[in-house]
Amino acid sequence: MSKPLISLCMIVKNEANCIARCLTSVKPYVDEMIIVDTGSTDGTADICRDIGATVYDYVWNDHFAEARNYGLVHANGEWILWLDADEELGENGEQLRDLALSDEYDLYSFQLNNYYGPRVDPNNVIRIAHPRLFRNGIGLKFRNQIHEALNVDEIFYQHDRVHRITHTPVILWHYGYLDEFVQDKNKSKRNIQLLEKALSSNKEDPWLHYHMASEYYRLKDYAPSFHHANRSILLFMLNQLTPPSLLYKLKYSILISTGSYEGGYPAIEKAIMLYPDYVDLIFYKGILLYMSSKYEEAIEAFEQCLEIGESNMKHLTQNGLGSFHAWHYKGLCKEKLGDPKEAEHCYNQALALHPGHIDSLEALRELGNQEHTG
């Protein structure tokens, strides 16, 4: 038998509600499916076998990277594709084989679209380029007890091989941030316990503090979230590293969520200086200005968002901040400045991009009511 080209590698536990969707989406494009089951009791392993996967039982030891690396040991493919059970391979998945037949690259990033909110809506996603398909046998493996990640820096950046990495148009859809999943508080509490365990032996790891801030943010427990976000920023700086853009996104999300507008502006300008192409930060600047009644300056920020647009995959980016959300908030500013005609134009621009945008529909309805009563 010829060597498999692509091996899918996954770790699972009690994923019966979503694993079939994931495996079915990817099965036509891979040669083997390696599943590491860390203790399912809901029939997940049987579902995987029925779809054609090979399942390996694994005694869970509170270490995600070690579980994933156990799967890599069993993979025979020339390439490894890794997914989570609550993900689905989407558009351009048929390109996987062509990507794996190329000699030019060793690592491919996909566009990861994270659904959020009460229901599946392609307009309500947060997206980022994420490394998912890599050449087997070149030393890539997972690290970190929780929020595991590939050792990309070690293999590529330290050996001047960045040219072997590229981004592709392949899309993944992630369902795990939808309200029904986020409302399961046990997952966040479990993650916090694992992060506390990791921090007990490495208090100075800025990424651990970032992930701790993220978990508390999901729980809407903003005080510890803000503490860990600031600690993370400080530790990156103490290590003479620029804090990553998503850390500033989290920090200013917290400030906006808690109504701390004075604490957010003008401090956010320093973050924007580091990442002038990050539409989310500029949008947050616009929100901070709007909530501080600085409507003209806010309009400038939202117009800058529209200029940047939606195509930058370098940062963790909420869909719409460079399009319909920016138009909507520009409309709100125009209303505050006493220009309902221009506000109406802005809301219509938002709806042209997202016809179901409820906030803009309601704003137009309210404008119509004001005309009637006026």
Image (cartoon, rainbow, N blue to C red):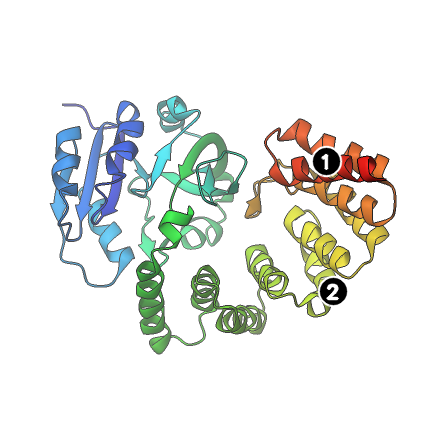
The percent position of residue 11, horizontal first and vertical second, equals 24, 47
The percent position of residue 170, horizontal first and vertical second, equals 45, 30
The quadrant the C terminus occupies is top right
The quadrant the N terminus occupies is top left
Q: Count neighbours of disc 2 (C-alpha within 10 A) and say few if under 14, some if 14 to 19, many if 20 or more.
A: some
Going by the numbered disc 2, the residue's amino acid type is Tyr
* Residue ranking furthest to the front: 373
Please state if 296 lies on the left or on the right of 114 as rendered: right
Choose the circle earlier in sequence order: 1 or 2: 2
Q: Can residue 106 be seen from the camera position used here?
A: no
SS assignment at label 1: helix
Please state if 198 lies on the left or on the right of 105 as rendered: left
User: Residue drawn at (68%, 27%), measured in percent from left and top?
Assistant: 352
Q: Count neighbours of disc 1 (C-alpha within 10 A) and say few if under 14, some if 14 to 19, many if 20 or more.
A: many
The percent position of residue 114, horizontal first and vertical second, equals 46, 42
* Residue sitting nearer the eye, 106 or 271: 271
Identify whether 186 is placed above or below 91: below
Q: Quadrant of residue 258?
A: bottom right
Going by the numbered disc 1, the residue's amino acid type is Leu
**Whole-number angstrom distance, CA of label 1 to CA of label 2:** 29 Å
Residue of label 2: 265
User: Residue drawn at (39%, 42%), measured in percent from left and top?
Assistant: 175
* Residue ranking furthest to the right: 338
* Residue sitting nearer the eye, 101 or 61: 61
Residue of label 1: 364
